[in-house]
Amino acid sequence: MNNITYIKDFTEWKKDFKFYVPIRVRFSETDMFGHVNNVSAFIYFEQARIDFFKDRRLFMNFDDPNISGVPVVADLQCDFHKQMFFDDQIKLYVKVATIGRTSLDIHYMAINEQDDICLTGRGRIVYINRHTGKPMPLTDDIVQKLTN
Amino acid sequence: MNNITYIKDFTEWKKDFKFYVPIRVRFSETDMFGHVNNVSAFIYFEQARIDFFKDRRLFMNFDDPNISGVPVVADLQCDFHKQMFFDDQIKLYVKVATIGRTSLDIHYMAINEQDDICLTGRGRIVYINRHTGKPMPLTDDIVQKLTN
Amino acid sequence: MNNITYIKDFTEWKKDFKFYVPIRVRFSETDMFGHVNNVSAFIYFEQARIDFFKDRRLFMNFDDPNISGVPVVADLQCDFHKQMFFDDQIKLYVKVATIGRTSLDIHYMAINEQDDICLTGRGRIVYINRHTGKPMPLTDDIVQKLTN
Amino acid sequence: MNNITYIKDFTEWKKDFKFYVPIRVRFSETDMFGHVNNVSAFIYFEQARIDFFKDRRLFMNFDDPNISGVPVVADLQCDFHKQMFFDDQIKLYVKVATIGRTSLDIHYMAINEQDDICLTGRGRIVYINRHTGKPMPLTDDIVQKLTN
């Protein structure tokens, strides 16, 4: 885990994860190299992030016209440490790494049944005003739910 | 092409196709068996059907609240004749096979660069009233554009 | 369930299913119409079929050069009865409908948490000799495992 | 394009791209938010990278047992600047940013028909000995083809 800019002390970094989503690899998520396609890592990150928000009861009312803020993915990043294969049962861990005024940074870690770290990653979510398209401050309620 | 209920006379059936969409297989559309995943056939059917409708200037105003009819996929069916591989350039042919009062049947044929038939298929599209969820009659304008 | 050629008596047909796979819809499996993309139905069929074979301990040695027979999807068919949505928990039922000399017919049924039937389907699997590419007879062992 | 660590001077960075792959968004690559799913960005990066290597006649003999080196994706990263939509025609630019002893860094840029930059990204490819699983030096031939 050297050279990964978003991980300073790996033991600390790993210890901070609590929430995870069980992910089972689908056959359609493999590719002709015989393993899980690199793209599928981001399918799993997305799924885990949405489940994490749901668990915190956050960002659940996309259709509510009274809520003007929506979370938008600003960037995504994944380091591939170990191949995953069809039928693997993955634990996809998610945590909030940092919270800014209008955005937050989410970190990811995928672990297989042999307890190998297959993926690590991160991505920034910006809270956007859907009417103006501009970033808006995260509310106290959001920050509280994120840091619980 | 025996035993395919939607093809009576294959030579005739094939001759009727005029419109096609060029499809290039994406790497992510392969699977661990080394070929194009069976599921991807339906990605290509969908793409070709939408392009066909667009070519006929049909069903293009999904967001227009004044248009109450929307085309809905009722069923889909595909026969796999020959494997497709990464980087294959496919011609995905589409035609309207039959037009009913509230629905139409669309047929599909995929041909690779060696002129092999890789896929044949069909599927019914029902014209649904988005407010009631019930089938509604295809308008004269739609029928005309479909039969042009 | 009228007009579906592979279902004669629906009550009987439904009763025959025993094995199912729990499938949770992934966010990436939705499309811009707000529901589960039609293509995803076949992702779920594929997953359920593979899990069914695994449960019966069938077709598990794809890499074993001593086994010359491989199961190949000859056709697939799906009827869309009800929309599925993100986060739906689907039960994907699978059963062997008929067994021929060199092939078998598999049926599918997807049921959501409200017990609505969302999908029904079927597809033929042909047992192919990987060296000749020709159909070969299903062995007694296979037939026994399929009918258990 | 501030805060993107892999872009120092954006005008320079952009000017360096020569090779691109035309990508047409598929309907199945959208999601329920009405735009192209974030995951699809990595489908396009992968496709463009493979096409780039093919254009340089590099890494084309995956099955050749005499070639022990294979390119492996070590990490991937994408910044999302502008939403993409169904039917968008994207130009996916690829370039080699840096070449090390056993790895190279590839940069990506996606531009839509209105000349908006939709995506920028990068990823490291490591040249791995398939027998040992360890990084091995890029050959002179590879370096030459990459820098042509």
Image (spheres, coloured by chain):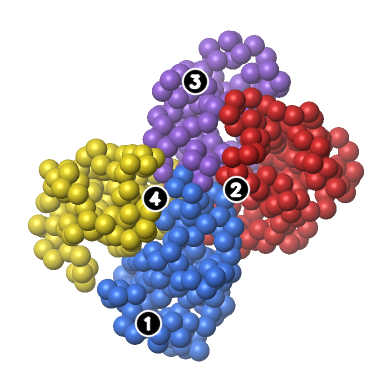
Chain colours: A blue, B purple, C red, D yellow
Do circles 4 and 2 both sit on a common chain?
no
Q: Where, quadrant-wise, is the N terminus of chain A in this rendering?
A: bottom left
Q: Toward the viewer: D103 or D76?
A: D103
Depth check, mark 4 against mark 3: the one in front is 3
The alpha-carbon separation of the residues under discs 4 and 2 comes to 17 Å
Measuring 11% from the left and 51% from the top, which residue is drawn there?
A: D15
Q: Are marks 4 and 3 in contact (CB under 8 Å)?
A: no
Q: CA distance from mark 4 to mark 3?
A: 27 Å
Which secondary structure lies at badge 2?
A: helix
Please state which of the two labelled residues, at mark 2 or mark 3, is closer to the viewer: 3
Q: Nearer the viewer, residue B55 or C5?
A: C5
Q: Residues within 10 Å of mark 3 (few under 14, many from 20)?
A: some
Residue occupying image coordinates x 54% and y 49%: A28
Residue C121 figure quarter: top right
**Mark 4 and mark 3 on one chain:** no
What residue does disc 4 label? D43
Do residues under tags 1 and 2 come within 8 Å of each other at their CB atoms? no
**Left or right: residue B45 compared with residue D11:** right
What residue would you read off at disc 2?
A: C43
Kind of residue sitting beneath label 4: Ile
Amino acid type of the residue tagged 3 in the rendering: Asp
Q: Nearer the viewer, mark 3 or mark 1?
A: 1
| Residue toward you, C131 or A28 | C131
Please tell me whether mark 1 or mark 4 is closer to you in this view: 1
**Residue labelled with disc 1:** A10
Distance, label 2 to label 3, CA atoms, is 25 Å
Name the chain letter of the residue that bears numbered label 2: C
| Labels 2 and 3 share a subunit | no
Circles 4, 2 touching at the beta carbon (< 8 Å): no
Residue D72 image point, x, y percent:
34, 55
Apparent side of residue B7 relative to residue B26 in the rendered image (left or right): right
